[in-house]
Image (spheres, rainbow, N blue to C red):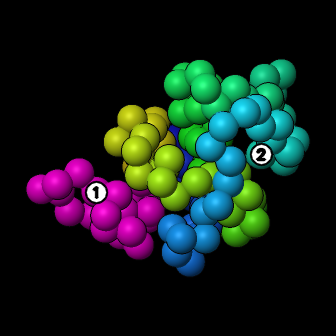
Amino acid sequence: MSRYAAAKPYVLPASLAELDGPTTGTVTLPRHIDWGPHYVYDLADEADFRLMYERVIREAQTDDDLNTNLSAMSLRHVWRELFLPLPIRAAWEARFPELRTPGTTATAA
């Protein structure tokens, strides 16, 4: 794990119920979340969908970034497949135990 990933502050929602983002169509992420060449995501494409969720979770700066781009139902469905730094995965799973893989416990970041 990089020192950046360990030290970076991450934003977490107060509750998963607040995540009311789109589940279909395309999403164009704001540049402060995705500054690369590929910032339009087709939610029907599974790889695009997961990549967008990873970027939003890693780079969100406000609750609104999370709430407008993530869906609670969709997040629960793909959570285990997302490639995330350990500190952020641990923080989300500590706040939302329902995201954990059965039989695991959250670790302190």
- Of residues 69 and 32, the one nearer the viewer is 69
60 relative position to 8: left or right = right
Quarter of the image that includes the N terminus? top left
> Residue pushed farthest front?
24
- Residue topped by disc 1: 100
Q: Earlier in the sequence, mark 2 or mark 1?
A: 2
Callout 2 amino acid:
Ile
30 relative position to 6: left or right = right
- Of residues 30 and 22, the one nearer the viewer is 22
Residue sitting at 67 percent across and 54 percent down? 21
Residue sitting at 66 percent across and 37 percent down? 24
Per the image, label 2 sits on a secondary structure element best described as loop
Q: Can the viewer see residue 2 in this picture?
A: yes
Residues in magenta, as a range = 87-109
* Disc on res. 33: 2
Instruction: Give coordinates of residue 104: x percent, y percent.
Output: 17, 56
24 relative position to 39: left or right = left
Instruction: Give coordinates of residue 86: x percent, y percent.
Output: 40, 49
Callout 1 amino acid:
Arg
Residue 94 position (above or below residue 6)? below
Please tell me whether mark 2 or mark 1 is closer to you in this view: 1
